Image: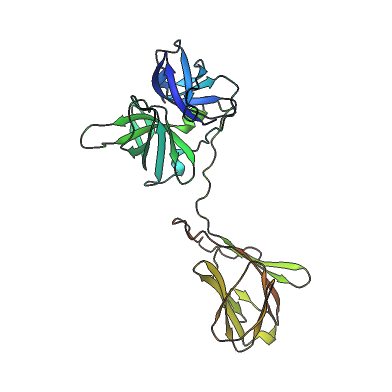
Amino acid sequence: MDAVGRLVRDGDGIGTAFVVSQDGLAATVAHVLAGHRDAAWTFEPFAAPGVSLPVDTGLPSDEDADVALIQIGGTSVWHPLLLARHGEVGPGDPVHLTGFAAGWDFDSGVGEYVGEVGAQGRVWAKVTCRQAQPGMSGAPVIATERQRVIGLVSERLNADGWNRDSVFLARTDDLVALAPDRIRLTPLPDRRRAGTLRLSWDRGTLTPIMETDDFDVSIGRADANRLLLSDPRDSRFHGRLGLSGPHLVYEHLGSHPAHLLGADRELTLVADRTSHVLSDKDRLRFASGVLLVEFSLPDLHDPTALRTEPADGDAFR
């Protein structure tokens, strides 16, 4: 069942909560429950109109950090949201939220992560969001690109001028501290999908040469080449691997030919500066041996995809 829902107190919608474990443990902010623990509380899942589930509010909370846990009753199968530290996202990263604004069935908001702010003697996460409204307290704020909850809506600043539309978030690490045996933080997945190039000699058995996300590899007998050929017969041979748009290509240089061996082709390559598109597990053959080329290309549609700076040496070299 959907993890986000409305918290209802004695029949009135008061705030938002979301499920953080498969057994129905849920999170909200402490000020939503404050002073009314003994009321009749229910949880209405966003994706299940008409469903109302009993809530036990007698679980740990931290009023200073404005976090609280509740237990949702019933036998529903939940799809809990994953939690991450807010410090793992950067300024300007997009965020979004869904909550239950007063007077609306539900509402959504988008914004950006700003950073941290010191207030009320504590450190809070801070985002900008124009759509956060009363009733959304406790709503999960999700890092859009990597789908992790980085905080809970605690307070919005609406004063004209400085900090308008800023939203303070209760922190996920304070939430996890309430029940570390039941919930935990999950590291954000790496958003840099740089791809991998793996080169090996195929001489009956495979001998790894390098594994790297720098696809620019020169091949030849000169010391300046990244892949140094050992056979003197390759003294007048050199070539280059590199990216061309969404493809890995090989450009043959020098006066000696080479051979490109693929699943359904075999080409003799001469030094005409023609770039040949390679497929994963193609082989290049020259006097020094047969070179197996394996790769997964970087995600060119990811604007954050970056090439890792080369280390002192490639792996296996």
Q: In the image, residue 49 lies at what x, y percent?
A: 47, 26
- In the picture as drawn, the residue positioned furthest to the front comes out as 50
The answer to whether 215 is drawn above or below residue 35 in the figure is below
Asked whether residue 92 appears in the rendered view, the answer is yes
- With 53 as the anchor, is 229 left or right in this view? right
Q: At 49% from the left edge and 45% from the top edge, which residue is drawn?
A: 146
> Extreme right residue here?
204
Q: In the image, is residue 123 above or below residue 223?
A: above
Farthest residue to the top: give it: 38
Instruction: Decide if residue 217 is in sight here.
Output: no
Residue 131, image quadrant: top left
- Please tell me which residue lies in front, 154 or 118: 154
Q: Position of residue 80 (x, y in %)?
A: 54, 32
Up the image or down, 4 lies above or below 111; here it is: above
Q: Quadrant of the C terminus?
A: bottom right
Residue 220 vs residue 166: left or right?
right
**Which residue is at the far bottom?**
255
**Residue at 46% across / 12% down in the picture?**
40
Q: Return the x and y of residue 76 as percentages of the image width and height.
A: 58, 25
For the N terminus, the image quarter is: top right
- Color theme of the render: rainbow
Residue 135 appears at what percent x and percent y?
A: 36, 25
The image quarter containing residue 28 is top left
Identity of the residue drawn at 53% across and 46% down:
189
How many circles with numbers are drawn on the protein?
Answer: 0
Foreground residue among 146 and 201: 146
For the residue pair 231 and 54, the one nearer the viewer reads as: 54
